Every structure is written in C-alpha cells, then in structure tokens.
Amino acid sequence: MVLLHIIVNGRGYDLQVGADPHQVDPAHTLAYTLRETLGLTGTKIGCNHGGCGACTVLMDGVPVLSCLTLTVECDGREIVTIEGLSPPEGNDLDPLQRAFMDHGAFQCGFCTPGIILTAKHLLDRNPSPDAETVEEALSGNHCRCISHYQVVQAVLAAAGTEADRDED
Amino acid sequence: MPLPKFEYLSPKSLEEALQLLADRGEGTHLLAGGTDLLVKMAHGHLKPRAVIALKQIDALGGIRFDPGKGLFIGATALLDEVASHPDVKAHFPSVAYAAQQTANVQIRNMGTLAGNLCNAAPSADNAPVLTAMGAEAVIAGPKGERRVALDRFFKGPGQTVIEPGEILTAVHVPVIPSGFGTSYQHVSPRGKVDIAAVCVGAMVGMDGATCKEARIVLGAVAPVPMRAEKTEALVRGKALTPEILEKAGRQASEEARPISDMRAGAEYRKRMTAVLTGRALKQAAEAAAN
Amino acid sequence: MEPFQMIGKDVPRNDARAKATGTAAYADDLKLPGMLHGRILRSPLAHARILHIDTSRAEALTGVRCVITGQDIPQVKYGNWRLFPDTQDEYALAVDKVRFIGDEVAAVAAVDKDTAQEALELIDVEYEELPGLFDVESAMAGDAVPIHDHCRNNTSVNRKIAYGDVEKGFAESDYVREDTFRVHAVSHAYLEPCSALAQLDLDGRITLWTSTQVPYIVQCLLASTLEMRENDVRVIKPYVGGGFGGKMELRTWEFCAAFMAKRTGRPVKFTLNREEEFLAGRRRHPMTIHSKVGFKKDGALVAKDLKITLDGGAYNAMGPTATFLCGNFGAMLYRYPNYAFYGRHVYTNKPPASAMRGFGAPQSLYASEIQMNMAAEALGIDPVDIRLKNAQKSGDKIPDVATISSCGFTESIQEVARMSDWKKKRASLGPGRGIGIGCYSFISGGVFNWFNTQYPFSAAEVRAFSDGTVHLLTMASDIGQGSDTALKQILAEELGLRMEDIRITSADTAMTPQADLGSWGSRVTLMAGNAVVDAARKIKERLFGALSARYNLNVIYEMECREGRVQPKGRPDRGMSFGEAVAMVQKASRGEPLVARGSYTPRDKGLVTPAFGFGAQVAEVEVDRQTGLVEVKKMWTAHDCGTVINPKGVEGQLAGSIQMGLGYALSEQFVMEEGRTLNTNFLDYKMPTALDMPPGEVVHVETYEPEGPMGAKECGEGLASPTAPAISDAVYHATGYRCKDLPITPEKILEGMNAGGKKKS
C-alpha cells in the first residue's frame, strides 16, 4: 500500500494511493483532492487546464496550479490553501485578506483565493513591491469582474507601499 | 474533464527510470513539470498507459555553472529557477530572460526548461536563444549518453530526436566567448502574457563595429525553431548599420516559412521576423560590446 | 437635500469575509449525500438530423444511473420571451435536429464524473448531416435550408423604429455618409463555469441550486419544461462567479439536473468545463451594421438610417432583446430629429449568441461612435465639440421611448476632455501616440415585459425586530456585482440603521418575495432598490405612527429614522431607539411581527427604460509602428450614474468594463472554422491580464435621477461600450488606420498603415 504524506494548512494527511473511492488515484489532480477528498472548496476550478489561475495554492510557499499538479507528486510537500492562510484559531485574518476586504478587491470572488495566494508569495519574496511588480506577479490570475485595479491597490496596501501607486 | 487513468511510477535514480521506460514500452510518458503533459491529458489529446515522474531523481535537478565548461540545466530545473539563478542572470542573461518570458508565475514555478524544449512547440520561448548559443541536449539511453546540438534536436511540432527509451537529462549551454553577445526577442499580438507569435534568438561575435560571427534562430515561423543561415552569412563580416540590419531582417523574413493560425497570420509573422531579427542583432551586438 | 448617512460610503461588501477566506460556496462547491454527477453529450456536427440514438451501451456501464435524450423528456420548448411563444425555440435536449457544434444531445448521470464521462463515449448517435450556414448572408439567401422549420430566410425577429422623416432629413443635410461596420463575437468568460445541483424532496418537489442571474426565470421555465407547477420548483442562487449576461436563461444542465433527480430520486449535479463554455457557450452577438447619417455643416445631426443584422447562432436565446435594444442604442446618445432602424435576427449554425454586458450597445455604439468621428473629421470639427453639439440633455424626449429625466452627458464629455488635456493632446501627440474618445448611454433596466411576469418587476420584504435589527428579503441576485451590499445600504439609509443591523436573504424563490426578473440590463439598483425603499417606507409609517401615539405628537410633525433612532425632525428628545419603536408597534398589534412588502414596476416610462446612464471615455495609446502592437497608456472616464451608492462598487464596475472593452477592442475573439470554435481554452482565448490594464482616472458626474432610489441609476453595463471606440479612435489618431471590423489586430494596423493611412510624423 503506497501512502502519501501531505501537509495541508498545517495538518498532516496520510492518503492511500489506489483506485477505490476513498483513495487517491494517480490521475487525481491536487485541485481534485483538495476539493473532493479533503473538502477544501476554497480552491476554485475555473478552467482545469492551467489557464486562469483560480486553482492556485502554495506548495512549499510557492504558487502552483493545483489543476496541473498530480496529488501523487505532492508526497512530503506542504500545501497552503485559502482556508489555511489565516490562523485557525480566532478571527485573525492575513493582512492580505483584510486589505482585499477593505479595498473591495473582488466582485464575484471566484478568482480571489488564487489571487490572494499568489500575492502572498510575492510579498513573502518582496515585502515592498511597486505596482508593476504586483501586476507582473498577478498576470497568471485572470479576473473578469474588476480586473486588477483594486486588487493591485489591496496588495500594495497590505505591503504598506500603497503610496507608490503611480497613476501615470 | 477528469484525467484519464494511468500507472504512476516515481523512480529514484536515472538507471531505474531508464529500466522502467524500457519495461513499460509504448504509451509511457515522462513527467517533469507537467504543465504541458497534464494539459494534453486534460483535453483528452493524450492517454498515457504509464507516467514516469522524474522529480525524485536528484541527478536530474539543479543548475550548475562552471566557468570553463559552461552551464548545465538539469531536466527538472524549473523555469523560475533558471530565470532567477544568479549565475544564469550574470553569464547567460538571454537564457534567464527567455525563461522569465515563458508563460506566467505559476507555470514558471512548475514547468521546466527541459520540458519546454521536449514539448517542441514551434513557439517555445526557450528554444531560439539556446539554439543560437550552441546549446546541446544531454540524452541518456540504454546505450549510454549522447549529446545533440539543439539545432538538430527538433524534428517537427511535438517531435524531437529523443528515441523511445531515452531521457533528456540536462541542457548544456557553452560559455559565451568574449566579444559575443546574445538577445531574445518575441512578439505576442494579443497582450503581454501570451504565447509568442514570432520569437528570435541571436548570438553575435563582434570585432569593434564588425560582426565576425552570427547565429540567428527563428521561432514560430517553421515547424521547428530554425537557423536563418543566409541571414547569418549576410551579416558576417559586416558592420551592423541600420541598413544592414534592415537587409538582415528582410533576408530572415524570406527564410521564414510561417503558417497562419489563431495567434497570427503568415504575412504578419514574416514581417515580425524582419523586425525582431533586426532588434535581436542590434541588442546582441550591444551586449557583445559590454 | 440632506447629506446621506450610508449612501456614497465605502462600506465593506456584504460578502467580503466569505470571499476573502474561501468560505463562499458556489454551486460546484455544494455536495449532497448520494449525489450523482452529470455530463452532457454534445453534437459534433453543425447541422444534422438525428436519425437514431442508442444509449444501451452507456446504460450498461457500471455506475451509470440515468441516461436521457430528447425522446425521454417532455417536449416543451422554452425561451425568455414567453409573451411570444414563437420565439421559444429551444428544447433542453435536441429532439429532431442539432443546430450547432456543441448542441446538447443527451445527458448521463453516474456515481462519479469519470464514469459519466466514460458513458458519454458509449452513446451512439446516427446523424444525417445537413448543409451548415455559418454567416448571415448565406443563412438569409432564398435557397438556404431552414435551421428552424418555422422560420423563413432564417430570420427569426424583425424590428423597426421610425420617427421623423429620414429621407427628408438626408435631403436637408449638408453632409451625408454611409458606412458598414462588422463587430465580432466575444465570450463572457465568467471565471465560474456554469453549475447546477438538483434535489428531489419526498413530495416530489425540486430544489435547484444554480449559478444564475435569474432565479425567478429559471424557476418558471424549469417548471414548464418539467410540466410541474411553478411553486413546486424552488431555485436558490448560491454565490455566483460572474455572469455578464451569460447566465440569464434556463439552460440544459439545469433542466437535466432536475429531470434526472426526479428520475433517480438522487441529487444530481452538472458542472461544465471550460472547453464546453468556450465551445458551446453563449457569446456577444456579431453584427453587421450599416449606418447612414446626415449632418448640417455646423455638425448638427439631422438624420440616421441604421440597419443591423445580428448573427444569432442556432437559437434565439436573448437575441430578440438584443435586436430590440441595439436599435434604441443607435439613437439614445445624441438627438436625432429623424431616425430609422431596421434590425434582423438571423439564425446560423453556430453557438447561440445572447445577452452580454451592454446587450447590443457595445456593437451599436462602436459603429455610431466611430462614424461620428469620421464625420467630425470630414466636417472639420473636433470630435469633442461635435458630441457636445448633439448630446442628449435632461428633459430631452426620445420619441417612442421616454423623456430623459437626468442626464450628465455634457458634463461627462467636458470632464473627460479636461482630465485628458484633450485639445492639446489631439493636436500635438508625438509619432505613434494617439488619443481617442468614445461615449455611451445605457438603460437602467428594461420596461419591456416579454417574460410576461405576473408579479412586480422587483419586490422586497423587510422584517423589523425589537432588538434593533431588520431582515431584508429580496429575490434580486447578487452575482458578484454587489447588489446585496447596495440594497443593504439603501435600506440602512432609509431606516437610519448601520450595515451590521441588517441581515439579508436574497435570491431564493421559495423564501424571497415574488418576484424579481433578475440581474441584467442594469436593472437591480434602480428596481430592487426602489422596492426596498418602498418596503422601508411602509415600515417607517408604522414606526412613526407608534411614536406619534406615544408622545401625542401633532400630526404636522415630519419624522425620521436616523442613527438608530426614530424621532420627530428637530426633536430628538421626543424619539426612541429603532428597536423600542418596533416593540411598540408590535405591542399595539398584539404580537404581530412588523413586516412590510415593497415592490417596483416601472410605469408610464415608455417601453424601454425608466432611466438612462451616460458617460464618456478617452483612451491614450502608443502604437509600435513596426510591430503594430497597441499599448493603452491611460484611460480617463467621466460618467453619470446618478447618485453613487457604493463608490468602490462603481469603480469596480468601471475597471471590469475597461478590461472587457480592452479585450473586445484588441485581443478577444472566437476563432471559428465551419461552425467549430477552435480556441476553447484561456491560452488561446486571450483576455487582458493585470499587465495589460492601463492606469485610469475617473470622475463620477453626479446627477439625481428622480426615478431611482436615492437618485441612483445604472452603472454596470453602459461602461462596457465606450472603451473599444475610444481605443479605436486613438489608434486612428496614432496611425491613420480606421478600424471598421473589430478586433483591432496588429496585422490590420500594419496593413492599414501601408494602405496609405494618414501618416503622422
């Protein structure tokens, strides 16, 4: 029996590989496992072919597309989904989540989890990005409702570099 | 659509991987970053019987730079690793730039440079400049290792010289000789993050204002990334004046054999071949001077 | 007027926390015990007769619970124009013919998605292929095969508008020009693919959770196609990941989920994949627009004769409304003393076009705005000045439509010209740089009632509690645009409460008051907002009555609800808290809860819309004259949406409109070959990304719309129109290439420049 050990949002899961309903089939994508097996539906599937970024999660801190990642490839990896961004206890939110709320940085919200996680990695790497860096970082996350204006503002606000936004 | 079912194999060594590849035979596919393979599977274009994952093989990972031997990019080195590696940025700036221009953040965190080459899309961002620089594919097989220069590596869209049973283990990029410079240019008519409609890689050796050596590779204008040999001959021994650059562009455009598809028409691709060839030569010459 | 307390404030969205933390559940996030997964078999042919379908192999597959075809279902056609049954032309599953590649032929429900998918491949369909008609010209030809048997020349809807005398107008004109424009199809590309989950209850009733803009319309049409009573179908809208007009009809998977839940007794869920959305999904109508327009020398418009042919695809969908409206949009922005419109909606063997943000306006206005600039140039008048000369104003009456009660169009043009430094830039931008203008007007909801609802257009129920809270129930559908938040703001303003005092339940046809026609046509703020105000005022009357009795107040006192209190104006000492007032009303009626119903139906407002939004936009571009690549450097927008309820919400609508307009102008299109959509993924269907979005500046020209709640009107769709003509005009200014067939591609620009486009050096 092959076992996968995956840490999702700080909790370890030992998953069996196999073809039974409760097992992880090699053909299962990480997006599928998160949503259908672990019930973490905050990870969204907008296209399932790596084109929209809605399914973005952090793997060992780095944003990847969970729809193009096989779960069996995640053995020993640490995954963070939108549900795991804020500490489990209490009402604390990540500064990015708070900034997105304050800036109204979404409408339908379907792309939001992926965008927040991509932005999380950006700020981990570069705590004070300028607007163009944020736009470049988010260029793999489609948003049809508001596109990225308020999103970029929210990310800059979370970084404390909002004033750097150059309108010209 | 759910992915089709397959047998998943995750060898720990190259030898084991080669053995599995031989054992499983036809319908076995190699998985590095997965950003091309899984898309093909998701669309139902590919139904592998077995998938051999390469990520657990330590020998295939990493990027090594040796001032004498050049750069070795392992088969599982990610595009982001290539784009951000200090040695690549310092000594092979166009290689880093091409990797940086491939797709978007997430794809660069998952996809590999080797995979981009093995996928053999005519528009692959990383092929033209590496080919122009004389890079070679290091290929392991049952009969041992062989090396193939990238200008003989591609055989057609989606096809390379890699035989069944073989694995591309690394890409080797020779040191850029002194007095040489490189450039990667691409154009995407539908926005900044897009698959290139035309891309050009160039390496030139300069002696003052005179071009003594040039290698020009055109992407997305033929079934494979192609050397523009007549254009290379045209600029060799000449000063790269605006007039020569324009002539070179026209020549490259004549050599190009593009098709029309949903990204661009053939006529536009020909025109862009001219524009980008001129720009690539100019930038490469400037880099050579620095 | 007194300053507002809640209106115009950037209050956090009602759904902010749920969406920022990933707890907001969309249709595909829902799971029920024993749930089956559905998949749809689609036609591989563009036009064919179905001779035979054999489902036996699929049914025999382990795990398959139900397979249905058009022969298994009640043969009831549906469509949103219930008032005109002839226009209802669609079956949930094809009965006799398939009419486009992707047309729905059969459906499977199985224990998991893999099995359902596998079963699709085991259904054998025998077709007799018919000639495919892929453009309107061949579809209208005399010898064309009818795509629908009842429909001659494949023209399903005709519409005429005429006032004044256009021939006389042209005769009196100093300058007349005629142009033909072609605009293309684009995708809504909402991020959430369509999804629906149906459950049967023990009494045989259906509950459907579905990603829709129109729960009430889905309820009614689903009931009729299932041959059930309307109230035996309950439709609940969970969180919806965008719609933009693409989710405003009953759709096959909604029917199949419900029908198969009835058949199997188990919950059934269908979720489309992105390939299906692109291959077979609704899209914006391609149109061929022939426009003849006459001016006086001074730029005054005299007459316009507009002929538009809509490429409707295989079914009517919302095409009849688009046909109707694109004619109105042709003469909504400027004053045309003489106007004629002839619109035709034509069937072709392509995926049906339907409503998409702007509902005929982006197409119609692209043509009219570009033509306006061409005329301005010929007449030697600045594009801004010619617009100011002809702009609609408050009090103008559009013949057969309505009187415009509020109009900030002139101010919008002036503002956008000022912000962009128009005159200077138009005269002096360097090589490869250009600046251009586009304008719009739009409806604040439709007055037409082709759905034939028996209920008010919008309704609201307010329940007030003695703990100082209220509960708002409304069928208005928040699909991401933020209507739940805006309606709460309106209610909070009216009742003098805080946002946290209000709980909202929306868009559940069994719980929220009948009815609401849904979220489309920019109708929600005005119509549902008015219904909320109506209900709130009824609550207030009861509270004021109680207060009056308590303090024995003179009847002449004006009263107010303000900051959580109910009081006579200017006499806060004679007031009480909102909760106390509610308790008193309740006591006076012996425990009866304090509940009020409100509603809104536009009356005496013609047949088009109760109110109009306006605006103007200027784009500055830089064109690489070697590659033809266009970079939009900046967008300036000034618009009149009446009172701004929620500034961030309005800005969000604007930002999204610019993104869609940018894509419409420059990068988005369906690549079609013999009726097949070739670009069925996000790599090949190119939406602008964060990097493509230009910086922008915006001014809200505030007017007060007397028909709207607190003076508000539309802001969601009008802005979808000006971006493409503004960019197009800027590209012309930069290169001399005038685009009359969208999209503007680098190839066309280079070709146009070569063809002797006016060179700027």
Image (tube, coloured by chain):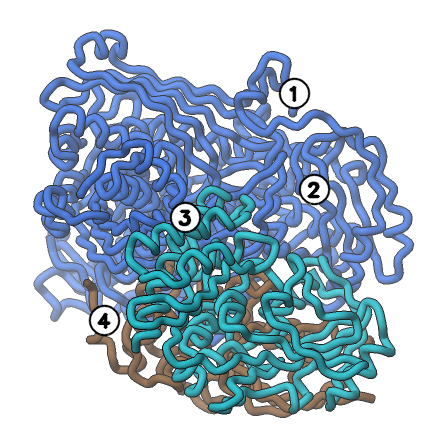
Chain colours: A brown, B cyan, C blue
Q: Amino acid at mark 4?
A: Arg
**Mark 2 touching mark 4, by CB under 8 A?**
no
Task: Please tell me whether mark 2 sits on a helix, a strand or a loop.
Answer: strand
**Residue C486 visible somewhere in the drawing:** yes
- Above/below status of C443 relative to C579: above
Q: Nearer the viewer, residue C729 or B156?
A: B156
Identify the residue position indicated by label 2 in the image. Answer: C104
- Above/below status of A4 relative to C415: below
> Which residue is rendered at x = 50% and y = 68% of the image?
B132
Identify the residue position indicated by label 3 in the image. Answer: B250
Is disc 3 surrounded by few (<14), some (14 to 19) or many (20+) residues within 10 Å? many
> What is the x, y in percent for residue C641?
24, 47
**Mark 2 touching mark 3, by CB under 8 A?**
no
Mark 3 chain = B
Check residue A165 in the rendering and tell me which mark sits there, or answer none.
Answer: 4
- Above/below status of C647 relative to C175: below
Q: Are marks 3 and 1 on the same chain?
A: no
Quadrant of residue A37 within the rendered picture: bottom right
Is disc 2 surrounded by few (<14), some (14 to 19) or many (20+) residues within 10 Å? many
Check residue C146 in the rendering and tell me which mark sits there, or answer none.
Answer: 1
**Mark 1 touching mark 4, by CB under 8 A?**
no
Q: Nearer the viewer, residue B191 or C359?
A: B191
Tell me how far mark 2 sits from mark 1, CA to CA: 19 Å
- Above/below status of A144 relative to C186: below
**Mark 2 touching mark 1, by CB under 8 A?**
no
Which of labels 2 and 3 is toward the front? Answer: 3
Which of labels 1 and 4 is toward the front? Answer: 4
